[in-house]
Structures are given as C-alpha cells and as structure tokens.
Amino acid sequence: MKGKLYLIPTIISDNTQQLVIPQRVKDVLVGIRHFLAEDIRTARRYLSSLKLYSSIEELHLEVLNKETPDNVIVQLMQPLMQGLDMGVLSESGCPGVADPGAVAVAYAHTQGIQVVPMVGPSSILLALMASGLNGQQFAFHGYLPVDANEAAKKIKELERESKLKNQTQIFIETPYRNNPVFMHLVKNLNPDTRLTIAMDITGSHEFISTHPVSVWKGKPVEWPKTPAVFLFLA
C-alpha cells in the first residue's frame, strides 16, 4: 500500500502559526516523518515552531525547488512507494500554488498516489478575497518583467485582457521591488482601472487597499520591504 502525499501549508507572515495553521494540519503532521521542502533550514524552523515533535532531528527532509531535475523526483518520492506518508512544504503559503511542489503532485498522480491538500493561508487568494475585484474571473501571473519597458508592455497587454474578459490580474513581487512595481503599475494603467495593494497579509502590519489608479497617483507612498500582492481590474 502506498503512502499519501500531504500538501502542508506554512505561514506567510512571521510568528502567526497559532493564528493561521488549523489544528487538522497539526494532527496530520504528527504522523509524518518525511518531507519535501524548498529550503530545509526554514522548513525545520517552521516544523519546530509548531512544537509537535520530541526532536526535529528525527525528521527526514529533502530539497524540492525550481532547480530540482525531473529525474530526481522518482528518488525523492520513494518513501511513498514504501507505504510512508510524506508532506510537501512551500517556503510560504500553500504548496503547489506558485510553488515547485506542483512537480511532486504531478508525479504522485501518475503513480496513483493519493494527494491530500490541507487548508492554510494563501496570499494570492486572501488578497483577491479582500480586494473587491472580480473573484469569478481572475488570473495569476507571477512576477512582472524587471525591465521597465518590458514591464510597461506586459501591464498594458494584461490591462486590455482584463477589460475584455472582466478579469482580475494578480502579481506577486520580491519585497525589495515593491516600489518599482507600484510605479510601473500607476504609470502604465488607465486612471479608472482599480488597483489593489495587499501587504503583510495575516501579519501585524497587514495593509489591503483598493482605489482607482488616479487616486493612487495622488498618494505619494514609500512601500515597506514586505511580501506583497498586486491586483488590478480594468
């Protein structure tokens, strides 16, 4: 009998374990000793913070990130084939969503392994929920291009698509690029396009606000270097 592959949510803001991680996730974790994680150090720190194990050293963690070759997946998933349950840990939020854990999930399906998604925080969905934008039709695009000209081209292209389909467009960014991305958006979007800025979701400095671009242009701001989600709807 094969083991089950559990998709284990992690926190998206520091020190929020007791607020955002359901008891059901903790109950499942007690029975898992094998994990795939983007970063073993932060995964160990997270698992240790939940205070579920007598010793973190008893856990077996292997790296699964965007650099992991496809031909290594079979080896990484061996505990499942031996009947042992495994957990996939994202660096932030839910595995498989904007996350390399999707590779493990895809392989599990080819092998008839049961995949069990666990409830937890997702900055993308939480930002959409709180935006007031269209939650029936939306698309996540990852990161905007770094180059200013390429970013402008992409923003205008997706704004046309947003207007045509009544579709909310969603992006994330590395914290140190929050201000450049914000400037690209307010510079290139139409004044009446609604833009949402969502920062430090679930954290002590959570900020989520939606305004037309024309309003944002009148608000000179310096965004902090904290995880952010950007959404717009034309």
Image (cartoon, rainbow, N blue to C red):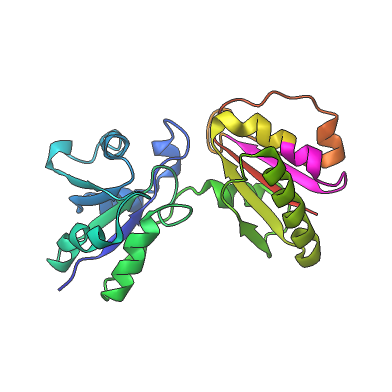
Residue 206 appears in the rendering: no
Residue 66 location, x and y as percent? 38, 50
The residue positioned 62% from the left and 44% from the top of the image is: 145
Q: Which residues are magenta?
A: 184-199
Residue 59 location, x and y as percent? 16, 44
Residue 216 appears in the rendering: yes
The residue positioned 66% from the left and 60% from the top of the image is: 138
Which image quadrant is residue 101 in?
A: bottom left
Q: Is residue 182 left or right of residue 192?
A: left
Which image quadrant is residue 161 in?
A: bottom right
Q: Is residue 15 above or below residue 68?
A: above
Residue 120 belongs to magenta span: no
Name the foreground residue: 84 vs 171. Answer: 171
Residue 37 location, x and y as percent? 30, 47
Name the foreground residue: 62 vs 16. Answer: 62
Residue 198 location, x and y as percent? 64, 39
Q: Is residue 50 above or below residue 7?
A: above
